[in-house]
Image (cartoon, helix red, strand yellow):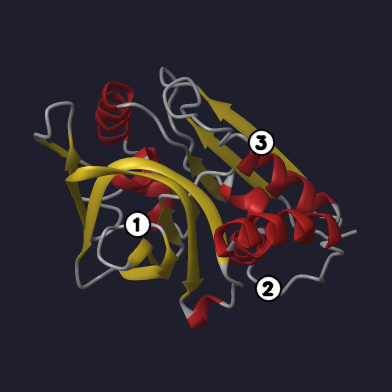
Amino acid sequence: MSSDRIKIVWIYPDLLSTYGDQGNSIVLERRAALRGIPTETVNLRSDEPVPADGDIYLLGGGEDRPQILAAQRLRGDGGLARAVQSGAVVFAVCAGYQLLGHEFGGEEGQPVAGLGLLDIRSGRGDQRAVGEIVGDVAGELNVPRITGFENHQGRTQLGPNARPFAQVVHGIGNGDGFEGAYSGRVLGTYMHGPALVRNPGLADLLLRWAVGRDLQPLDDSWAGRLREERLNAVAG
């Protein structure tokens, strides 16, 4: 049995939880358990303070108004920023990804202040991106080709202190040929699916960051079937 213990904080499921994003926390719990690593998951409502002692923080997607409210509350709370400063892992999807940046587009496209935890700025594009997305992940992250589902009108520009998570093979992503962004242990993406269900290698990246060491491999035959199905659907 490992002496590691991982505290997972799912931030504001009452505001940010679309397209089954809760599946991301379930996958992390399961893949940790299969390696003998105990986990504690906190489902944090938007009227509760963000604990600064988490190991992995998850943010999901959401509509415009809940996204704005979530950004306001997280800015005022400050707990997530303190956790990042302490080296915590953050994985954010879609609206959660956007609000990690310096600003994002509000209900009428107006700029809304984000958290400034990723050096990105998001606005609105002319067309909505809806459908499958496939990308080749930055080599230094050692994650296989990613597959997911995107449904957003966002367009995201990276600043000099953020790196693209993946190069788009199919789909829109950030709108510039790349998908998502990361800096340190903070990573954001437009992928639903849920992202970690479709991409166990990405889940393991987050777990490696959290425990600070390599992990024993798992039998991913079932997850591999899902990945093969989705990748073949795009290729076809």
Q: Residue furthest bottom?
A: 139
- Vertical placement of 52 versus 134: above or below? above
Look at label 3 and name its amino acid: Thr
Residue 222, numbered label: none
31 vs 12, left or right, is right
**Residue shown at the point (54%, 35%) measured from the top left:** 10
Residue 213, numbered label: 2
Q: Residue furthest left?
A: 110
Q: Residue 140, image x and y in percent?
A: 50, 82
Q: Which residue is mark 3?
A: 41
Sooner in the amino-acid sequence: mark 2 or mark 3: 3
Asked which secondary structure carries label 1, the reply is: loop
- In the image, 70 versus 172, the foreground residue is 172
Q: Residue 196, image x and y in percent?
A: 62, 51
Q: Which residue is mark 1?
A: 172
Crowdedness of circle 1 by 10 Å Cα count: few (<14), some, many (20+)? many
Q: Please say whether residue 103 is visible from this viewpoint.
A: no
Look at label 2 and name its amino acid: Arg
